[in-house]
Amino acid sequence: ASSASQLAWAFASARFAHAPLFDVLADYIGRHVAVFDTQHLAMLAWSFATCEVEVPGAYKAIASFVKGGKLWAFRMDEFCCILWAFSRAKWRDEQVYWDMVQVGNLRTDELTAEAAANLLYAAAWLRTDACVTTAGFDEDIDKLLAFLVQGLLSGRFRLPDAQACRAAVWAIGATGHFAEAEAFVQRLETDDASILSPLFYHAAIHGDGAQGIEAASRTDTGARRTARLWARLAAAVRGNTAIENEPTAAVRLRAACGNSAAISLARAGLGAAMRSTLRRLRDDGLLNTVAIRLAQGVGFAADESGDDDPFGSGLVDAPCLRGGARIAEHYAQELERLASAAAAARADELCAAGVVLAAVGDDACGSHLDACLGALLDEAVGRSRPRTALILNTGSRRLGCAAAVRVASHGASGGLGEVADCRVVAVEEDPVLACIAQNLAALAGVGDTVTHLVGSPRDCLHIASASFAGGPADVVILLPISGGCCGDGGDSAALKDLRRAEELGLVGQGTVVVIDQVLCLGTPRLLWYLYSRRCYQVEIVSLPASGTMLCEDWVVIARRGGDSDDMPGAPSAAEIHRGFPELAMLAAESAGLWRMRESDRPAAAV
């Protein structure tokens, strides 16, 4: 039992989901669960959930074991780990959840910070997910949630890292306690911008968010909350890296955040609040080309004055950072490109798409764009003129910003430089990169066409689905170079995003799926999945080395046809999931290379 649990833990720590091995371990625990002690059960449950392997027999055995008063035998960290694993795996056993919530309420004095984080996630999932009926113990869950939230706000539980903090912010907001989630972020002593990502998502789905992006973004409260978050980000412009930048980088980011706040207010029709934001930008000397274009849209005069405050706090009044300001290098580079595009575009120009594309591209990005999006738009999509498009991880690379602009400009109305009659939804987890992408879209004249969502694809895809009225997107562009500030990235994240889009109907008959960097990133599971599904016509476009690209790379263009997975000879869902014997080793090697690459990337701090 000890060797089995340690082996599972080792593979899970390396994020190596070796399906045959975990099947053997699941079968072993199903037959010998009684010989495992509490620590080994917790380790196995955590391993199964972390690798997201499908082992219903193991979960059933563990659930049966913990019933009947045995929960008191577990240490509190083990107890919370098992409850987290059940919720992460979406295990459907109302009785075991009921027992665990009741025991959890009686043992709160034993909680550590890490156990509290696991318990908070599980309780929030139980309260919000419809796959388990909790009507009989909703009050118990609410009592547990109230204790945990109060513990976080009071400082009793100090979460160990940024990932735990993000999960806590998501869980608090998911249960409808947006003010408490904001208060928790306010008390955190961190300059990690990614902490704000779940708050942006919860602000976006305020009110009628389930009915689509427009319904959510146009609500008064939702728009003001989003504007406040942009203001908060502007006020928190300071870094923890060792890279010294000129203060201009901080000023540029404050200006971009102010523009995004104004865009949020404009979408909701809050003209007075938007004008107040523009006045603040003007008074701080931050009224750049993007802001001027926004001002022209609402008839804002340069000498206009007023007292309206859309935020109700001084967050937006934080002074610009002067001498010694430091911003993460990759943010500074993207802000420099935004500034270059803004300087090159004339304020009275209707559409500066060409200027934006020139500003965000270099030799490497240009070759990607010509080979990938050029082929997509001109050969595949150009003939049909896409009316709906979904782009995931928009800000993770300059190509994402260029993709949004190109697709929006080549929509139903015509070619580059024209305002398109199409709708583009762009998802990005990193708030800073999303802010820059939103400013570039506004500068290109496609701000009304491209809707930017800040949050993980796991959360935001259902909003995109509702926005497209449940129908498929004409184009789905997936940029998997980064799993986002909250995701696990690489092959795993790319495949999860694609499958989630399929489940929600965003990928359907006629959809063209474009996936970048499938060779250098390494996406063996994703490629196996696409080639195994008979409904996809898969084409791989090879990109030769050029510029800063040191080696060849691939782009996948997959065209979704009819449902042909049930044709004679087509592999079953289980066979596709299991793959071939060498697939697990390829995926592990790919994941290792991805983690080495990500370890060299700077943290998401400003």
Image (spheres, rainbow, N blue to C red):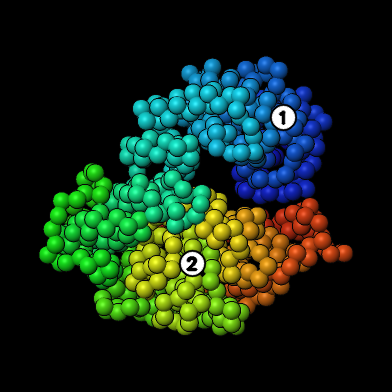
Decide: is 605 above or below 544: above
Residue 327 badge: none
- Residue 163 visible in the current orientation: yes
Pointer 2 residue: 424
Residue ID at (48%, 18%): 109
- Residue 517 visible in the current orientation: no
Mark 2: which amino acid?
A: Val
Decide: is 256 above or below 54: below
Placement of the N terminus among the 4 image quadrants: top right
Q: Percent x, y for residue 422?
A: 49, 71
Q: Compute the Cα span from label 2 to label 1.
A: 45 Å
Query: Could you tell whether 309 is left or right of 43 in the image?
Result: left
Residue found at the very far right of the displayed protein: 568
Pointer 1 residue: 62
Residue ID at (15%, 51%): 307
Q: Percent x, y for residue 536?
A: 71, 69
Query: Could you tell whether 543 is left or right of 7 in the image?
Result: left
Residue ID at (65%, 45%): 51
- Find residue 558 and report its image quarter: bottom right
Element marked by disc 1:
helix
Mark 1: which amino acid?
A: Ile
- Find residue 304 and report its image quarter: bottom left
Frontmost residue, 380 versus 109: 380
Placement of the C terminus among the 4 image quadrants: bottom left
First in sequence: mark 2 or mark 1? 1
- Find residue 461 and report its image quarter: bottom right
Q: Percent x, y for residue 202?
A: 44, 46
